[in-house]
Image (tube, rainbow, N blue to C red):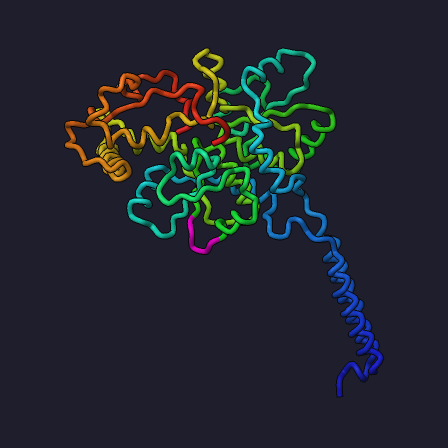
């Protein structure tokens, strides 16, 4: 003979607990701290559009102009920050970016219409964090193209245009050069130079 | 007593039906933003062009190179056995099948590494593992593998070893005979840097 049959109330109690657990589960499930505001497809569109990058020139203009409200976040570590940074930047290292206080602060900035620019030592370092911010809905967050390296080079007037995503070579042509290297001396268009030594201030170029 | 069981059964069925009505969770298989940010701060996702070259030469069966440049660029030049998934098609179902293959190490590359890194971030968010980014992209590939520069005389032995490896790799990829070490300089040929006219669009 089953216990339940002796005490029908037990069955009811078990059921009630069961239902409460499921409902509690459903309620907590739908409320994570941070949610994606962009679908993966929208994120793909964002990356293809080249939207959201800011050049040092533009940043300078925004800083000197009085109309735009700008906050700058330096995501390098405290040591690198201490050695030099863009004036007015706030140092929040990459691992701390999503901490509660910082998210609150960013939400506040977004409501007040601030533009937020984040940068790392190069563009790669800030690339991922920038994408995360965009994906969780901070559409006012921009990434500094070229990062701090390029900003410094720009300040020292050592740069040309920053175009990290361009092909620096005609790959198909370069990759077959060696095959014909014996007999292509008569091609006037090609200059025989050694790449490395020619470059100046090349720290930024190429992203190698 | 039968009533109780009947009631229980009906309740279970109702709850099951209720679960069907729960709105589909968008984040079902995606990782949380916090986890994504954490993974981004790790640099273990990068592989060097030397590592990629070595894997290609050794015929590593677990290597899956994914070229994220537009199809036009891919046809003009690509790495050995690479698969072309243009960045704008990354989320298309046909291409998604290439990402989740068990035991395969996916390496994204583009002209540089920025767009490849963006592809990595999106794939990571989708929950894929064993994915990597080739550091420096094809620009770096050409500079280091196809046009290796001889280290200065004061350089360490390691650098010379690396240089020898790159010379060998260059020969492997371009089909030239390995030159004698002293003939090094004649091998370094450079095509004039393209200005503006280079392949348009993303990398």
Left or right of A26? Residue B89 is left
Residue drawn at point x = 28 percent, y = 38 percent: B173
Residue B163 image point, x, y percent: 24, 33
Residue drawn at point x = 35 percent, y = 37 percent: B49
The magenta segment: B101-105
Residue nearer the viewer, B157 or A132: A132
The quadrant of the rendering that contains the N terminus of chain B is bottom right
Residue nearer the viewer, B50 or A119: B50
Residue B6 image point, x, y percent: 81, 77
Q: From this viewpoint, is residue A173 visible?
A: yes
Residue nearer the viewer, A95 or B189: B189
Residue B27 image point, x, y percent: 64, 49
In reply to whether residue A82 is colored magenta, the answer given is no
Q: From this viewpoint, is residue A121 visible?
A: no
Residue drawn at point x = 46 percent, y = 56 percent: B102
Residue A3 image point, x, y percent: 76, 83
- In the image, residue B115 sits, relative to residue B36, either above or below, namely above
């Amino acid at each position: 003979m089953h216990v339940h049959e002796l005490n029908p109330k037990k069955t009811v109690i078990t059921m009630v607990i069961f239902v409460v657990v499921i409902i509690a589960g459903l309620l907590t499930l739908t409320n994570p701290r941070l949610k994606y505001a962009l679908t993966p497809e929208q994120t793909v569109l964002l990356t293809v559009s080249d939207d959201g990058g800011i050049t040092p020139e533009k940043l300078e203009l925004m800083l000197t102009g009085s109309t735009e409200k700008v906050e700058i976040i330096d995501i390098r570590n405290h040591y690198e920050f201490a050695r030099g940074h863009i004036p007015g930047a706030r140092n929040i290292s990459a691992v701390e970016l999503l901490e509660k206080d910082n998210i609150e602060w960013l939400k506040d900035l977004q409501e007040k219409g601030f533009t937020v620019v984040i940068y790392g030592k190069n563009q790669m370092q800030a690339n991922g964090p920038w994408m995360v911010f965009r994906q969780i809905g901070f559409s006012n967050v921009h990434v500094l193209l070229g990062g701090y390296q390029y900003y410094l080079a720009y300040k020292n007037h050592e740069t040309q245009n920053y175009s990290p995503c361009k092909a620096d070579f005609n790959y198909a042509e370069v990759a077959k050069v060696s095959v014909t290297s014996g007999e292509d001396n008569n091609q006037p268009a090609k200059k025989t130079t050694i790449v490395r030594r020619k470059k100046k201030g090349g720290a930024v170029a190429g992203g190698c | 007593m039968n009533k109780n069981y009947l009631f229980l059964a009906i309740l279970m069925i109702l709850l099951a039906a209720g679960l069907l009505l729960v709105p589909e969770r968008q984040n079902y298989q995606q990782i949380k933003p916090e986890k994504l940010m954490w993974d981004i701060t790790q640099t273990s996702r990068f592989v060097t062009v030397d590592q990629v070259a070595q894997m290609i030469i050794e015929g590593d069966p677990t290597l899956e190179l994914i070229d994220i440049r537009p199809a036009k660029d891919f046809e003009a030049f690509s790495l050995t056995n690479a698969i072309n998934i243009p960045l704008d098609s990354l989320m298309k179902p046909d291409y998604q099948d290439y990402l989740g293959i068990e035991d395969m190490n996916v390496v994204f590359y583009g002209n540089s590494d920025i767009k490849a890194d963006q592809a990595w971030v999106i794939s990571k968010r989708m929950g894929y593992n064993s994915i990597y980014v080739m550091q420096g992209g094809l620009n770096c590939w050409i500079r280091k593998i196809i046009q290796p520069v001889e280290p200065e005389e004061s350089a360490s032995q390691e650098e010379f070893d690396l240089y020898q490896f790159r010379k060998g790799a260059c020969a492997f990829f371009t089909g030239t005979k390995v030159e004698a070490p002293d003939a090094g300089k004649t091998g370094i040929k450079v095509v004039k840097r393209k200005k503006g006219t280079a392949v348009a669009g993303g990398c």
